[in-house]
Structures are given as C-alpha cells and as structure tokens.
Amino acid sequence: QVQLVESGGGLVQAGGSLRLSCVASGRTFSPYGMGWFRQAPGKEREFVATIMWSGDSTYYADSVKGRFTISKDTTKNTVYLQMNSLKPEDTAVYYCAAKVHSSLYAIDVRDFGSWGQGTQVTVSS
C-alpha cells in the first residue's frame, strides 16, 4: 500500500509563488512516474504536470507551462511542484498521484493509482 501526503498549499496573492511537496511511503512504492492534478469547485480534476521516476522527462498542461516546474528527489520519495506567477484561476485543491502507466504522455486520471488527500491553493486577485 502506497501513501501520498501533500503539503505546501496556502493563500497567496496573484503573481506570487508556492512550492508543493508530496512524500510517498510504503514498501511497494515503485511508480513509473508521479503527477500533479488539481480540482476547482464544480470542475473536473485536471492534469497539471508529470515526471517520470527514472530519468528527467516532464510534461505540463498548457495552462501552467512556463510557470510551474515539477521535480523529484528519489532518495526521499518526494515530488515537488514549484508554482510561480500564480493566477486566480490556479485556485484549486492540488493532488499528487503515482503513475501506473509507462508513458510520459499518459495523463488521464485512470493512468494514476495512489492519490494523496490534496492541499488547497488559493490565489487572490
């Protein structure tokens, strides 16, 4: 059983930055990669970014490209999401998830297995 715990969310003004962390635990943790998703009130959960666990390949949603950076520390079983130039439309609950598909471009929610509980990010205008 894999457990994922996110942290780092909060309230920030537009143009500000936040760094989210996601720590994984469990004896069987060996994902193809990790991903970040977000869900705003009344909307479906949407893909934000993903990184492969082996190598440094990353892929981003167009809405965050150039502003967000996903990274990892495999020695700590941790993935990060650095969010810069935040906009009010970035307001959502952010979730990390372990990828169970071998393709970098597999970004549907069904391509991810274990999920964290989420961390709230609120960007004020």
Image: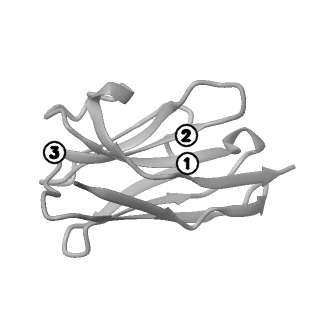
User: Disc 3 and disc 2: Cα gap in Å?
Assistant: 20 Å
- Identify the residue shown where x is 62% and y is 62%: 9
- Identify the residue shown where x is 21% and y is 54%: 56
Quadrant of the snapshot with the N terminus = bottom left
Q: Earlier in the sequence, mark 3 or mark 2?
A: 3
**Residue matched to label 1:** 94
Q: Nearer the viewer, residue 27 or 103?
A: 27
Above or below, 2 relative to 35: below
Quarter of the image for residue 22 reads bottom left
Q: Amino acid at mark 1?
A: Tyr
Q: Nearer the viewer, residue 16 or 101?
A: 101
Q: Secondary structure at mark 3?
A: loop
Q: Secondary structure at mark 2?
A: strand
Residue at the limit of the structure toward the bottom, as seen here: 75
Horizontal side of residue 79 vs 11, given as left or right: left
Above or below, 31 relative to 21: above
Q: Earlier in the sequence, mark 1 or mark 2?
A: 2
Q: Secondary structure at mark 1?
A: strand
Asked if marks 1 and 2 touch (Cβ < 8 Å), the reply is yes
How far across and how far down the image is residue 3, in percent? Answer: 32, 58
**Residue matched to label 3:** 32
Quarter of the image for residue 29 reads bottom left
